[in-house]
Every structure is written in structure tokens, then in C-alpha cells.
Amino acid sequence: MHSKRLNYGSNRVFDFLVLWILPVGLLLLLSALFFVGNRNVLHRIFYILFSVPTLFLLCMRPREFKDLLREPLAIAFLAFSAWALTSLLWSPEHSTDTDLFKRPLNTFMLFGGCGLLLHYRNELFKPIFFSAAVIALVVSLGNLVEFAKGYSPGLRMIGGLGALDNPLLSSHLFGFFTVYWLYVCMTTQRMKVLWFSVPALAIMTMAVLATGSRTPLVALGLAILWMSFVSRNRRSALLISGMILGTVALLLFYPELITERGTSFRLELWSISLQLIAEHPWIGHSYDSELYLTVSDGYQLREPHSFALGVLYYVGIIGFIPWAFMLGWGLYKGLQQRAQPLFILASSLLAYGIGAGLTEGGGILSRPKEHWFLLWIPLAIITGLSIAQRHRSLLRMPVQNLKTAAFEQMCNNAHVIEADGLGPKVLRLEDGSFLKLFRPRRWYTSGSFNPYSERFASNSEQLRTLGIPAPDILGLYRLSDASSAVAYTPLPGLTLRQALQSLDSSLRESLVERFGRFMAQLHERGVYFRSLHLGNVLLMDDGEFGLIDVADLRIYPSSLRYALRQRNLRHMQRYPQDRNWLFETHFEQLVKGYASVASPAATAKIREQVQSL
């Protein structure tokens, strides 16, 4: 009994950390630099709300760690980090700074945390990113207003609020969120969202230009080319045309932004760096070695202003191989999975980071700061998306745009199964498949970020992987009126309500007992079906139970807590006929079936819920 209580408590801690703490940690990681006083605050936020919880979660469930190690990006990062730490053996300084070991660990926890979050709570990823982008937008707009008031020729905007204190470093974040708004403009099908995103894109682009940095302009150009290549829609042509026109306008009207500072010692820095790299080309100078570059005017710098040269200097060609593999594999996954919009976003952010890293940076592993937005955050997101897709919590199936004429042709001679005041909701098509329609939601609701048609499809896929029969998804569609639809093969059989109506009392008892066992199996596997009632449970032709209308369903990382189990029963008690069969006439049979799978404590809570009424 003590062991079961300990296991129940462990599950509750795991769920709380995954479902609530990691989302908050990711939001603050993406946005905190815009409002915290210094980077040390960001470091503490990340350690407390993301890194340490992720380490705790991976230790609680080693299978999650094994699952992470199935990802090529995670393996490549471990290889890169292991070689970097190995290089300490030939370090000229022989430092004992433990922070050198914490940095790769914390970066790996970023990979692991994104994997856990996108697997178990991926519906929050879009709202989190949108919230961080809005914070960046508001702060950037305020910075631009203040910058315009005090503008003088040659002045460069730093950031104003938060921990942003350098024009070039500030431009990394401005460019990061510029890519996000560009992604929204490229992928959204809702005009209200587009009308909001276009001004947001313009504001973030102006913030990048106001920093006076040329590196993000190169990076944005690379991101635009990549996003156009993987999207391949009509807006891609407009995007490329806009980039060409913008470049021409910049060269015609503001050429000094490009030419006035020359090469900023970049060519000289790279030449000196290559000479140093040639001293130890294969193994590098060591992860913790000091790098000092003195340019012709006597000014000393500590970065080669190139990520690639920095990797070659510190860990040599051997360390460069897994590092380059991570970048290549991230872009490859973005191209391979371009049917999923989130892969387009993540790979475009990576393309931006690669472009920015051509002339900026040099440190290979750092604490959380602006440079994380260039490589580690995009790579971690791609890792998390891959894990989620492998577990079917993220859809592989593309959403097709269905024009009015094609929709009418599809629905020709269809039979209306369910309708409401706005029209048909479920149609049986000529080929026997079903088409379920979902009306558009307001742009700021969760249904806008994660359409119910996609939830239906994703939930069906996940249920099937858990061994629970659910509809087989045939296609996902986006309609001209902003509605969405999902086509699926219906499960053969009768609803449990229909089946119970047709049976006598003795057979009904047996069926209710079997349903109690099935309900316990759902709860033990973490399936919380908010709309669970006898009309949404199917008794199939083979005698097994299946679920239908699964859009309103959520799968938790662990077995359901007692409160959610009781809430499931309260929902079923709202239906008079269900209440009579399950909780009055045949309640003991229901509890008997439930107790055959669930723990005595969970069964007692179920009994307590019913008896309290």
C-alpha cells in the first residue's frame, strides 16, 4: 500500500512539472531578456523552472531519457559535449571551474525539456511562442518610440528595457521574433491573424534595422530563402519579391547602413583565427582555453565572430563534425517534415541562427543568453518536435486547403448524421467515410491555435498507439469559411447506450461490468475524455469498446489523479438514462469492473463520488 501511495505521489509530481512548470520555464526563457534586469536573473529562471525540473523528470522516468537518446540531434550534442569536456585534458589553463561542466548539462536539459513539453503538452507550444512574441513586440515598439525621440545620425538602438545592453546581441532577439512573425504571415489562413501579424513583422524588422547591425540582415535573408523553399506556396513568391525590393531600397536610400563600417575587422579576425586553428587543427586548443585576437589598430577581441571558427578553435575538426551534423540534420528534418508548420518555424529559426553565426559569436557552450536563440533553442525545438511526432502527439498528416467547389463535390449525396443551428456537423459520404466539421473559433481562443479537427486526428492516433480503438483518420481539411474538417473511417458497432437499451437485465449487468473495466483502463493510461458518456463509447462488432468524437480528450503523462476520475463520473451522471444504468441499477457491477484494473484507493474515490450524490 505504501508503494502504491508513493507511486501515485510520484505521478502527480511528474505531471505537475511537465504540464505546468516546463511551459512557464519555456515562456520565460524566450521572453525574460526583454524585462529582467540582467542575464543572471535569466540564468536563475532557466535553472529553477526548466533545467532542474527536466533533470528531475528524466531521473524519475529513465525511459524518457532513453527516448531522448533515440534522437540523432541529442546523440550528436552529447558527442559534441563529450569531446569538448575531453579537450580539458590538454587545456593550458587546467581550470577547475565546475561551470564548464554545468553548461553542456544545462544545454542538454534544454533538449530534454523541449522533448517532454512537446510530447506531453504540445498544445501549449503555439500559445507560449505567441505570448513571448507579443512581449517582444510590445517592448520593441516602446524601444523604437524612445529611439526615434532621441535619434541622431550614427546612433544604434540597444534595447532599452531588460537585460539587452548591446546592439548586436539585441538584434539576435529582434531577428528571432521577426522570423516568428514572418512564419505566421506565411502560414496563417485567417485574415484577422494576418492583419495583426503584418504590422508586427514590420515593427520587429524596424527594430532589427534600428540596431544598425548587418549580421541579422544576412541572417534574415537566409531565413527568408529557407522559409520560401520549404513552404512553396504563393506567399513564397511575394516574400522573395519583398526581400529583393527591400534590399534594393536599402542600397539606394540607406547604403551607409551596409558600407559605413566596412568589414568591422571581420576579415582580419578570421585570418588570425585560422592561423591559430592551424596550430591544432584536429583536437583544438581546448574548451576552456583563452582566445585573444588583436586587430591592426590594437583593439583586442575575444571572439572570432564566427561560430564555425570558434568551434574549430576550441575543439578542432573532431568536435566540428558533430556540431556541423546538428545544423545539417536540423535543416534536413525541417525539409523532410515541412507538412507540419512547426517544423517550418523551427528550421527557419535555425537557418536564421546559421546566418547570424557566419559573422557573430565564437563561444561553443555558454549559459543562457542571446546566443542561445541562434542555435540551441531552434535545435532543441526540432528535437522536441521529432519526439512528439514519433509518439503521434504531433500530426504527420498535412492539412489540405479545400475550396468551396471541391467541398461541395465531396459532400455530394452525403447523408447528414448530426447538425446544429449553423448546419451539418457530421456527414456520411458516398464512400462510407465520415466528415466531421468544426466551426471557426475566435482568434484568441485555444481552438485558433490548435484547431479541433487536428485535435480529433491527433487524439485518434494516440489512442490507437495505446491500444484503444478510435477512428482511422483519412484526411484533414481547411475550408474557405475558416472552418476545419476531418475525414475518418467510422468504427463498426453501436453506441453503448444503444447496446444497453437492447439487452435484458442480466446481460446488461455483464456489459456494465466490462464498461467499468474499460473506463479504468482509460484512467490508468492517462486518458481523460471530458465528454465521456455512453453515447461516445462504442461497442464494436468484435465485442471490444472504442471511443468516438474524441476532439475533447487529453492524454496525461501518468494515470489520472482521483479528482479527474471523479469529474469523469460527474459528467456521466448528467445523463438520466446513463445515471440509472451505471450509478443506480448496476452500480456494483460498474465498481467491480473498475476495481479489476484500478487501485483500491481509486475505486474507493469512485464509490465516494457516487454515494455523495
Image (spheres, rainbow, N blue to C red):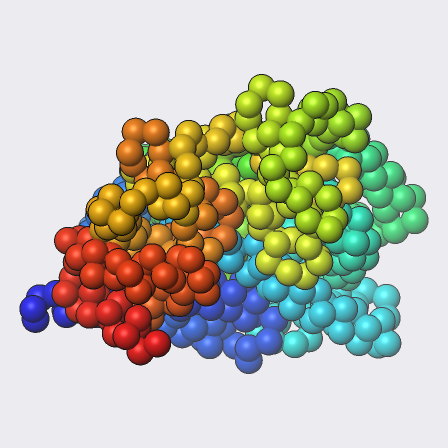
Residue at (68% x, 37% y) in the render: 478
Q: Position of residue 179 (x, y in %)?
A: 66, 49
Q: Position of residue 328 (x, y in %)?
A: 47, 32
Residue at (76% x, 68% y) in the render: 141
Q: Position of residue 40 (x, y in %)?
A: 45, 75
Question: Left or right: where does residue 2 sit relative to residue 181?
Answer: left
Residue at the far front in the pictured view: 504
Residue nearest the viewer, comparing 126 with 139: 126
What count of labels does the image hold?
Answer: 0
Residue 352 visible in the displayed image: no
State the quadrant of the N terminus: bottom left
Residue at the far right in the pictured view: 253
**Residue 57's image quarter?**
bottom left
Residue at (39% x, 46% y) in the render: 501
Q: Position of residue 232 (x, y in %)?
A: 69, 28
**Residue 462's image quarter?**
top left
Residue 3 visible in the displayed image: yes
Residue at (58% x, 48% y) in the render: 452
State the quadrant of the C terminus: bottom left
Question: Left or right: where does residue 373 sit relative to residue 280?
Answer: right
Residue nearest the viewer, comparing 196 with 28: 196
Question: Left or right: where does residue 135 sit relative to residue 454?
Answer: right
